[in-house]
Amino acid sequence: MRASRDDRAKDWAQSLAIEALGFLAGDIERLEPFMSLTGVDPGNLREVAAQPSFLVAVLDHLAGD
């Protein structure tokens, strides 16, 4: 079965957000303020990174930075 346009857009946005999180993780000066604002700590980062709302927050944070 072929993926719908909405599914492809969702997958693309999720991939972009995961890459953006990797960018943040590679720059401690950007990562620390983000983690402070979101209340995330290194112990639960992997868990929350699976949540779509968190990935939206990643993109929102970078867009405002």
Image (cartoon, rainbow, N blue to C red):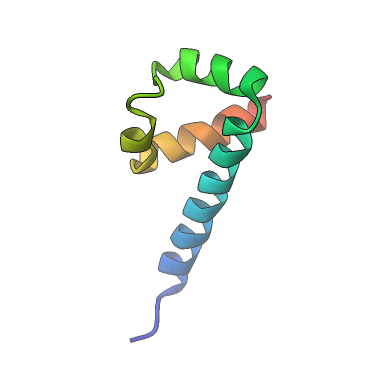
Residue drawn at x 62%, y 21% is: 28
Farthest-out residue, bottom: 1
Instruction: Tell me where residue 60 sits by quadrant.
Output: top right
Residue 32 in percent (x, y) is at 55, 16
**The N terminus sits in image quarter:** bottom left
In the foreground, 26 or 63: 26
Q: Is residue 6 above or below residue 33?
A: below
Residue 56 in percent (x, y) is at 47, 38
Left or right: where 2 falls relative to 62? left
Residue 47 in percent (x, y) is at 31, 36
In the foreground, 39 or 29: 29
**The C terminus sits in image quarter:** top right
Residue drawn at x 45%, y 58% is: 10
Left or right: where 26 falls relative to 39? right
Q: Is residue 7 above or below residue 32?
A: below
> How many marks can you see?
0
In the foreground, 20 or 43: 43
Residue drawn at x 40%, y 77% is: 3
